[in-house]
Every structure is written in structure tokens, then in C-alpha cells.
Image (tube, rainbow, N blue to C red):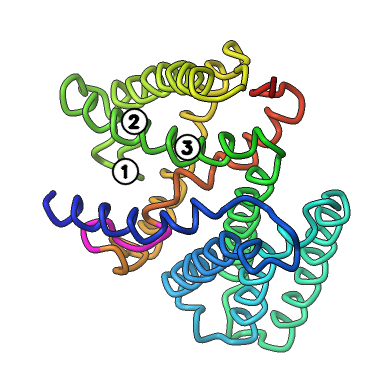
Amino acid sequence: MKVRIITAVVAIAGIFPFFWFSDPVEPTNPLNYLFPLLISLITFVSVWELLHCMELDKKYFVSVPLYLAALVFPMLARIMRNMREAFILAAILTALVLVIYLFAVIVFQFGKLDMGKIALAFMTSFYVIGAFSSIILLRDEGVAGRFLFLIPFVFSWVTDSFAYFSGRLFGKHKLIPSVSPKKTVEGAIGGAVFCALTAFLYGLIVNAAFDVTPNYPVLIIGGLIISVVSQIGDLVMSAIKRQYGVKDFGYMLPGHGGLLDRFDSSIAVTVVLIVINTYFPIFQVI
């Protein structure tokens, strides 16, 4: 626990400047690209950890295009922030081109590569890339973006923490023991309840400190949805690790594992949050 706390403190101190200067500014200002640069690097390492787990990191015909996409798309989200539809179209077309490319790799490397493994690598890599890129999209949602982009981090970590403590105190029924033996139904419920309470508290803090009016019903219900989705994100990555017989995706964060181990819950909710906010705006700027 001591190592985990020290790592968390050092990591927060390291990323704080990037978060502080996360505002989109004039395209000629280098600070405009500081935050997306951080997200691009995190995305690249996360994709590498995923492919390394699957023993595809050195299968360069497969890995290199995914590495390039990991570096490019979070940055492209900021560059094209005023052309969101064009960005989404570019992402869709890139995904389709990569599918065709990987089909070609499967054909010309037939018998040398596992088709199922390549399919899983593509699906999960683009999930990771899209989810991290969505953090930039959330940050660039005008004034409300400064509060929206923190939600995936805060709410998922609250869910994770209180699911752990609730499970330790009240856990009797295993949730999905074949995937994660220590998680319990009581823990999952506790995480969701405390996430909804945190959502309400988050709204109160934002309302008191800034000229922003939260939509409390959407925030609270969204908190419940986010909690469920974040736990699914955690479990699916646990399933992948169990499938390939590894404990952690990496070792970059002592006590936590790799970057993907730390952000698996957070990235699961980013796209869901964009959908919720698109149809039911969470914050109204006064």
C-alpha cells in the first residue's frame, strides 16, 4: 500500500502541469498541444502494453500501424477540435482501412499469426485509442469541458475505491470469480452507490466554485451508469490478462502495474460520457 500511495503522489505531481495547461488555445501556441501530447504518449504505452500481453508487440506488421494510430488520434482530436464530424469520419475510415490491411496481413502471414488474436488486438487497441482520444473531445467541450474531462478519472477511481472497501466490509457473493476472484456483488453495488453520491457532490462543488449549473438528475443517473461501465472496463481488461496468463499489463507504475492497469476503468466511460452529454448536457454555463 505504501508503494501504491507514493507512486500515485508522484504520478499526480507529474501530470498536474499537463492538466493545468489543458485548455485549448490558439493553434500557434505550443501549450495548445501539451495536454494531447500527454494523452498520446499514454495511449501509445497502453497499446504497447496490450500488444505485449498478447505477444504481438514485435509482430511489426500488426503493431506499427496501431502504434501510429495511438500517437496520432489524440493529437488529431485537438487539431480538429472545430471539425468534430470530420474527425469522427477520419477515425471511422482509418478503422476500415486498418481492417482491410490486417486482412491482408492474415492472408500473407497465414499459419504464422493467430487470426483471433489479431482480431482481439485490433478491437481492443482501437477501443483504447478511441477512449483516450475522447478525453480530448471532452476537454474541448467549451467552458463545461474543464469539468467534464475530469469525470472519467474521478468517478471511476471513486467506484474502484469504494467497491474495494464495500467488498471488504460486506462482500459475500462473488461477482464473476472466473474473471476477477476478489470482486463481489456487494462491492459492485457499493461502488455504484458511492459514485452516484460523488456525482451529486461534484455538481455541488462545481456549482459553488464556478458559474456553472449542473443538471443534477443527469449527473446522478450518469454517475450510476458510469460506475457500471467503469467496472465492466476493469473486468474486460482482467479477462484479457487472465486469458494470456499475466498479472499486470506493465510495470511502469510500481504497486499499480502498467498504465492500462491504472486507466482501464477510466477509459471505459469516456465515450459513454460523450453520448450522455450530447443528448443531456450535464453542465449549463451561466
Q: Is residue 201 left or right of residue 206?
A: left
Q: Is residue 239 above or below residue 277?
A: below
Measured as percent of width and height from the top left, residue 222 is found at 57, 22
Disc 2 target residue: 175
Tag 3: residue type?
Ser
Q: Is residue 214 left or right of residue 92?
A: left
Camera sees residue 265: yes
Q: Is residue 184 above or below residue 24?
A: above
- Which segment is the magenta one? 254-260
Q: Which disc is residue 230 wearing? A: 3
Disc 1 target residue: 180
Tag 2: residue type?
Leu
Q: Residues within 10 Å of mark 2 (few under 14, many from 20)?
A: some
Tag 1: residue type?
Ser
Residue drawn at (52%, 30%) of the image: 226
Residue drawn at (64%, 38%) of the image: 145
Is residue 257 in the magenta section?
A: yes
